[in-house]
Amino acid sequence: MNRYTRDMRGYGPNPPHAQWPDGAKVAVQFVLNYEEGGENCVLHGDAGSEAFLSDIAGAASWPGQRHWNMESIYEYGARAGFWRLNRLFTEAVIPVTIYGVATALARSPEQVAAMKEAEWEIASHGLKWVEHKDMPEDEERAAIAEAIRLHTEVVGERPRGWYTGRCSKNTVRLVAEEGGFDYVSDTYDDDLPYWLEVGDRDQLIIPYTLEANDMRFATAPGYITGEQFFTYLKDAFDVLYEEGSEGAPKMMSIGLHCRLIGRPGKLAGLKKFINYIKGYEDVWTPRRIDIAEHWEKTHPNKRFPRPSRMSRSNFVAAYGGIFEHSEWVAEGAFDLELGPAHDSAVGLHNALCRAFRTASRAAQMDVLTAHPDLAGKLAAAGRLTAESTSEQASAGLDMLTDDERDAFTRLNTEYVYKHGFPFIIAVRDHDKNSIMAAFKKRIGHDNDAEFTEACKQVERIAYFRLLDVLP
């Protein structure tokens, strides 16, 4: 099958109402990444020193050597930055989620004790703070298992959330397959949590952020001052708060690192932002696990047969009648590059219409002639398809007077004689009076114009039919 696995649709134009606790208009969630002691270092058995996310401009890994300056910057995060942030958030009574690298947590028992005392969530940030993009699948699966084992040993309980960060294309699937995580955050693709179906596992995804993130102090383009960080966070918050006020509450993730935002000049912007949101009563500042528990309770996953995952036979059986008695349209759509974006009424409608539009005029004519006359003999004899019966009834065509039925019969006869196919209209857009008016108007069209209009109406009918069976 020609299938595209990336999901370019998400929730589409109508995301669910988050229903945050106490009617909050936005959920502001702070993540503190604890990586100090888990980074690349020859002391950790790595091939070279760390080169990522530090205040050393243009840093590069030193193969086979310790990078004393790099190590000391990471050590600042553990020795000073963490405690400054611990004081800030505990005094503000805002719980955070720790993304804890297991080997880093193992080397920082006092910090772990402080996290637990503050009742912060300690989620897993993997076994080591290293790149995973070239890691073989079996090796990454083993690293995930070891991260869980070590985390549980150090913290006293297994992690319920996961974020690798420097992940591979396999990471999310492998973590979901492990089966024990309430959520995974290795995506940046939405402002709300969502469900990902991995085999039989319904895995909750809580997207993270790389832009409302202090890592921008160490990357270009980035922040230079704490005030710039504050301004960006404030602007993001203001937009999300406005959306929440309009009935569409969202989630705002903020990513922090002990060795970055833990520096005094950078911390000033974060403190200013915390004070800013404290001025709003309807703001929720949860841990990520709190969001996961809320979403699972409020918006549990609802599975349905997804068109992009169906076999050909099941696909044609399910959608072969969307275009009246024309399974070939469904067969043509099945052969297209279908993906998650086509698992909705709008998406699958587009695929079916593409197959219909690229067919020959003769094939399109076969679809038109497959449609029954409106309020015609088939309807009177009860021989319409279930879809056509329902559609005609919705416009009151099953409740015609004798005069109205005679008028439709006369117009049907004249229309078919002139154009060679039945009069087709998406009756769900109309009542019997507007249908009659359209009938009288369109019967005078030239044949090409009416053929084009009839094809458009066929597509419109197909859309309504899909709405009955897909979200």
Image (cartoon, rainbow, N blue to C red):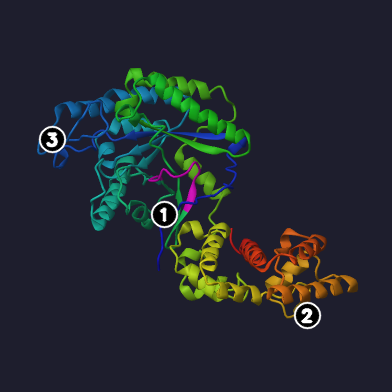
The percent position of residue 135, horizontal first and vertical second, equals 23, 52
Q: Is residue 193 above or below residue 67?
A: below
Residue at disc 1, secondary structure = loop
Q: Give the residue number, with chain letter if any, for mark 1.
A: 6
Q: Nearer the viewer, residue 194 or 72?
A: 194
CA gap, disc 3 and disc 1: 36 Å
Q: Give the residue number, with chain letter if any, for mark 3.
A: 62
Q: Is residue 408 left or right of 342 when viewed as pictured?
A: right
N-terminal of the two: label 3 or label 1?
1
Q: Amino acid at mark 2?
A: Lys
Q: Nearer the viewer, residue 209 or 150?
A: 209
> Circle 3: is it few (<14), some (14-19), or many (20+) Cα within 10 Å?
some
Q: Is residue 71 above or below residue 263?
A: below
Magenta segment: 185-195
Q: Is residue 14 left or right of 58 when viewed as pictured?
A: right
Q: Is residue 187 magenta?
A: yes
